[in-house]
Structures are given as C-alpha cells and as structure tokens.
Image: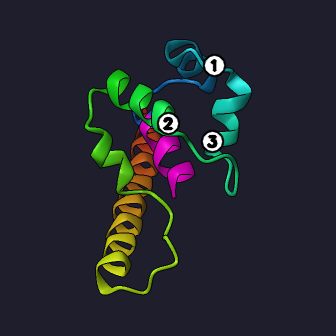
Amino acid sequence: MYDRALKLIRQYHRLSQAELADALNLSRSFVSELEKPGGKKPSIDVLERYANYFKIPVSSLLLFAERSGSSELRETSRAFAADKVLKMLEWLEETTRDELRAG
C-alpha cells in the first residue's frame, strides 16, 4: 500500500516525481519505483524524509505498511482501514483533477 500512499501524498501537493526526488535527495527513478505497484518498499529513512518534508508523523505513513501475514483481527482491521483511506484519497485526487480541468 505504500506505493499508493506515497504517490497520493505527492500528487496532493502537486509535485512531480522529479521535484519530490530533489526535495528528498533521492533519485527520480527511486521515487518512481516507490510509487510503482509491487515496486520498492521504503526504508524507515525514506519514510522519515517524506514525513519531515510533508510535516506528517511517520506513524501516519506506517499505517500503509503491507500486511505482515498475520490473521489477527487487529492487523486485518488496520489493513482494511488503510485501504479505505487510500480509496477515499484517490477519489478526492481524481475529483480535484477533474474540477481543475473543467476550469
């Protein structure tokens, strides 16, 4: 889920991958890989860079960690909530983009 979350954060702030890569001192290709489904997983260092740059708690980003394989209700609930948050943010981003195009 990190791929979707990190991409949405970047898009919300209207940054290109290149702009964000420069700001975080990462390569553009690495940012692209982070946002690609099934791509690279961010390290804690990278999550801290995102958190510091966007002024959000690292714990907010950790919500989007992939499932650990555990079938515990708590883990299942966390993953379900994270997916719902991402779907809502994707809808908001798409709606905003459509409104900007309409003028």
The span from disc 1 to disc 3 (Cα, nearest Å) is: 13 Å
The answer to whether residue 30 is above or below residue 78 is above
The x and y percentages for residue 57 are: 25, 38
Q: Residue at x 35, y 31 (%)?
A: 51
Q: Given contact means CB atoms under 8 Å apart, are the residues at marks 2 and 1 in contact?
A: no
Q: Earlier in the sequence, mark 1 or mark 3?
A: 1
Point out the frontmost of discs 2 and 3: 3
Instruction: Give the secondary structure at mark 1.
Output: helix
Q: Of the residues shown, which amino acid type is indicated by label 1?
A: Ala
The answer to whether residue 66 is above or below residue 21 is below
Within 10 angstroms of label 3, few (less than 14), some, or many (20 or more) residues? many
Within 10 angstroms of label 1, few (less than 14), some, or many (20 or more) residues? some
- Residue lying furthest right: 29
The residue to which callout 1 is attached is 18
Instruction: Give the secondary structure at mark 3.
Output: helix
The answer to whether residue 68 is above or below residue 56 is below
The residue to which callout 2 is attached is 101
Q: Earlier in the sequence, mark 2 or mark 1?
A: 1
Residue numbers of the magenta segment: 1-9
> Can residue 57 be seen?
yes
Q: Nearer the viewer, residue 29 or 15?
A: 29
The span from disc 2 to disc 1 (Cα, nearest Å) is: 23 Å
Instruction: Give the secondary structure at mark 2.
Output: helix
Q: Residue at x 53, y 21 (%)?
A: 20
Q: Give the main secondary structure, helix, strand or loop, of the magenta stretch.
A: helix
